Image (cartoon, rainbow, N blue to C red):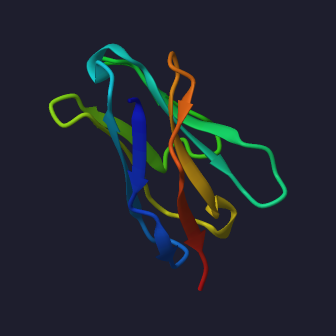
Amino acid sequence: QVQLVESGGGLVQPGGSLRLSCAAQGFLFSKHPMSWYRQAPGKERELVARISGSGTLATLEDSVKGRATISRSNANNTVYLQMNSLQPEDTAMYYCYADWLFVWGQGTQVTVSS
């Protein structure tokens, strides 16, 4: 059974950092590109970052470019999103997505507030 489980969200002050993790199971993880999306209240879900199966190609959306890094450990079947210099506008539910399998995780909440 294909499953994605996110973790690492929480409440952080502006300027702080978080590392989100997404543990995958049920498919050949290293062959699949993976993405992080986020959805703020009242807004549409938006792409944040994407990484190739090998991890050699990664893209970041303009909204987080310079403040975020996407990476993966194929040995541990996990994809990560490191977020730095967090701002209130980063507050959202963050979702992991297996692009070719059309499978979403349950999400992890990130709240940036003083």
Depicted 29 relative to depicted 22: above or below:
above
Q: Residue at x 29, y 18 (%)?
A: 28
**Residue 63 picture location, percent across and down:** 64, 45
**Residue 30 picture location, percent across and down:** 27, 19
**Residue 43 picture location, percent across and down:** 82, 51
* Quadrant location, the N terminus: top left
Depicted 91 relative to depicted 48: above or below:
below
Q: So how many labels did they put on this image?
A: 0
* Quadrant location, the C terminus: bottom right
Q: Is residue 15 left or right of residue 79?
A: right
Res. 90 in view: yes
Q: Residue at x 29, y 34 (%)?
A: 72
Depicted 10 relative to depicted 43: above or below:
below
Q: Quadrant of residue 61?
A: top right
Residue at the front extreme of this rendering: 1
Please state which of residues 97 and 57 is positioned toward the viewer in this rendering. Answer: 97
**Residue 67 picture location, percent across and down:** 48, 50
